[in-house]
Amino acid sequence: MNLLIQSGHIIDAVGLNGWRVDVGYPEDRDEAERRLRGDDADADGDDADADAVVESDA
């Protein structure tokens, strides 16, 4: 991204509804599988970010 900024390009963020899980570790793959099955709650049962809102200044 630094190269894009240095060359004059504009970088903007866009909020998306949904979830993202980095599946680099077995426990992360397990969480992704749980979410794909429809169990969106975190492994500890706390779904703290389910209603998180990201606002844009644009």
Image (cartoon, helix red, strand yellow):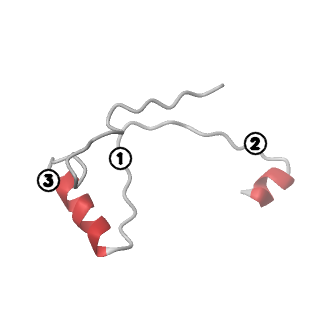
Q: What element carries label 1?
A: loop
| Residue annotated with mark 2 | 10
Drawn side of residue 3 relative to residue 15, left or right: right
Residue 13 in the image, given as x and y percentages of width and height: 60, 40
| Residue annotated with mark 1 | 19
Label 2 crowd bin: few (<14), some (14–19), many (20+), radius 10 Å: few
| Mark found first going from the N terminus, 3 or 2 | 2
Label 1 crowd bin: few (<14), some (14–19), many (20+), radius 10 Å: few
Residue 49 in the image, given as x and y percentages of width and height: 36, 39
Drawn side of residue 16 relative to residue 26, left or right: right
Mark 3: amino acid: Arg
Q: Name the one closer to the observer, 44 or 35.
A: 44
> How far is the residue under mark 3 from the one under mark 2?
38 Å
Q: Quadrant of the N terminus?
A: bottom right
Mark 1: amino acid: Trp
Drawn side of residue 53 relative to residue 23, left or right: right
Residue 24 in the image, given as x and y percentages of width and height: 39, 72
Residue 54 in the image, given as x and y percentages of width and height: 50, 32
Identify whether 30 is placed above or below 26.
above
Quadrant housing residue 47: top left
